[in-house]
Image (cartoon, rainbow, N blue to C red):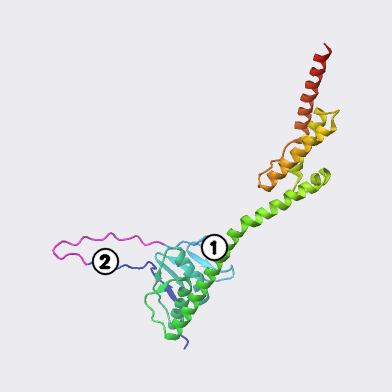
Amino acid sequence: MAEKQEGQLPSGRRRTATAKPDASKPATAKPKRKAETPTLTDDLTGKFLRVGNKLYRTSDDTKPIVRLEPDRIKTSNIDALPDIIRIAKANGWTSIRINGGGPFKKAAYLAAAAQGLTVENYTPSKVAKAEADRLQARVAEREKRREAKGAASSSRQPTDQAVTLKALSERFLSQTHEQNARDPDLRRAQSLVAQTISIARAKYPDDPVKASKQVEARRQEVARRIASGDKIAAIQVRNQQAQRVREIIQEQALTREGRTR
């Protein structure tokens, strides 16, 4: 007869050794800790359907795969053990005790080893211990690669960003005003130059050289801002241009009027 593989994972908080009380002093009763029902973490919420403290895989399940009880996680499904161990670890458990048959205990032991948890009431065979060591080595190597990749990405990002911004700045200077105005990456930057073009033309209607120099100075300034990563906010070009042009025309009119008097 096949062995029934039902089991449960009782309290997973590691018990710590305490010094024995002095016999000459009366022992004080330790306050009893309230048993807590494990909570389900966000990363595992999508793997289960929760109804109260019962967890199902799909709506076709006739009985729950997992039951969450005070200081216990119960299941009869070996395939669910890796996720159950994740729940235990997320709730701060560092070790577990297993109830169930031999195959169930072995599967729980290996799942716990992969997550860095220990099993208090199971003595693995040498082969099972070797498999657990291999699982832990793989997990450690995977974490090491992930950390190295993250460190390399963070160290490379500033350099890559600087290269990209420099190329964008060079593109801004090499393209015409019309091209920059149509360029999705440079429209905002070109709007600043377009504003200066309107102002310079109104300010120097009879001196295109001066107007051109002012526009070029503005263009170089915007290019430097692009290269440094400065955020260029969108501006309402037409309204601002019209207002500034009106101010310049009024100034010029007043100047001419003063000269004719």
Q: Which residue corresponds to the image point at 76% horizontal and 28% vertical from the top-left?
A: 244
* Secondary structure beneath label 2: loop
Give the vertical position of 149 relative to 162 (above or below): below
Which of the two residues, 101 or 197, is positioned nearer the viewer here?
A: 197
Residue range (magenta): 20-36
Which of the two residues, 34 or 229, is positioned nearer the viewer here?
A: 229
Answer few, some or many: residues within 10 Å of disc 2's Cα (few below 14, many 20 plus, some between 14 and 19): few
Residue 29 located within the stretch drawn in magenta: yes
Q: Which residue corresponds to the image point at 37% horizontal and 62% vertical from the top-left?
A: 35
Picture coordinates of residue 153 (x, y %)?
60, 61
Q: Mark 2 or mark 1: which comes first in sequence?
A: 2
Q: Which residue corresponds to the image point at 84% horizontal and 13% vertical from the top-left?
A: 260
Give residue 100's mark.
Answer: none
User: What residue is pinned by disc 1?
Assistant: 43
Name the residue furthest left: 24
Q: Main secondary structure of the magenta part?
A: loop
User: What residue is pinned by disc 2?
Assistant: 18
Circle 2 or circle 1, nearest the eye: 2
Name the residue furthest top: 261
Picture coordinates of residue 236 (x, y %)?
74, 36
Question: Spatial distance from mark 2 to mark 1, Cα to Cα?
Answer: 36 Å
Picture coordinates of residue 63 (x, y %)?
52, 71
* Secondary structure beneath label 1: helix
Q: Amino acid at mark 2?
A: Thr
Answer few, some or many: residues within 10 Å of disc 1's Cα (few below 14, many 20 plus, some between 14 and 19): few
Q: Amino acid at mark 1?
A: Asp
